[in-house]
Image (cartoon, helix red, strand yellow):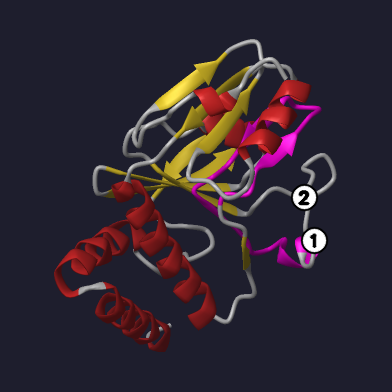
Amino acid sequence: MLLDLKRFEILPGERILLKNVTWNEFEQILEELGEHRASRIAYHYHILEIMNPLPEHERNKEIISDLVKILLEELDIEFDTLGSTAFKNQLMQQGIEPDNCFYIENEAKVRGKDRLDLTIDPPPDLALEIDVTSRTHREIYAILGVPELWRFENGELQINILENDNYKEVEYSPHFPDFPLKEVIPQYLKQVKIVGRNKTIKAFRKWINEQIKNF
């Protein structure tokens, strides 16, 4: 590998773009970077982006992920969350590391698998992206066939579903059609900053159960 990534310092909130990166080079870079790191990657037709998120980015990611997990738990829906696993499809020349992702409908198809290959395995059912300093690579998610993409930016939650190879913004998540999440999730994110995580999580769980009783 001609590129020595150890010579690069990517500060929080910054990114670098590498052009004309072959698939083999992309695989080598992923191996060199390792799995236990803060940076995120995106690979789109030989262009590789490496981004290092800000603390605000990571905080929002963790809280929103926790809220989704609680929703699935209280609705008694089996799921698997794979965090920022690198999803790749060599045939499509695409690769992405979401801020978090969830297998819901397809959970049983990937259960127990330590390595996923999107040429044979299904993509995540729901992907989450937090945009603080970077843009969501919607085109990569669309090509990989991720059915639902959440994007959080500037205090607002955007819910997108894949239709005819493009994302369409909708008001309600197909996975949680009875919950006004675009309104509620930003409210609980603000609440975390005021009363703390534990009280907020308990309040959110209580709210969910109150909604369920009204079904």
Task: State the image coordinates of residue 149 (x, y, percent, origin top left).
Answer: 51, 46
Q: Amino acid at mark 2?
A: Leu
Q: Of residues 52 and 212, which is closer to you in this image?
A: 52
State the SS at label 2: loop
Task: State the image coordinates of residue 107 (x, y, percent, origin top left).
Answer: 71, 65
- Residue, disc 1: 113
Q: Amino acid at mark 1?
A: Lys
Q: Which residues are magenta?
A: 84-110
Could you tell me which quadrant the N terminus lies in?
top right
Q: Of residues 81 and 39, which is closer to you in this image?
A: 39
| Mark 2 → mark 1, Cα distance in angstroms | 7 Å
Magenta-drawn stretch contains 18: no
Q: Residue at x 24, y 42 (%)?
A: 154
- Residue, disc 2: 116
* Farthest residue, direction bottom: 213
Marks 2 and 1 in Cβ contact (< 8 Å): yes
Magenta-drawn stretch contains 103: yes
Total numbered labels: 2
Q: Of residues 209 and 52, which is closer to you in this image?
A: 52
State the SS at label 1: loop
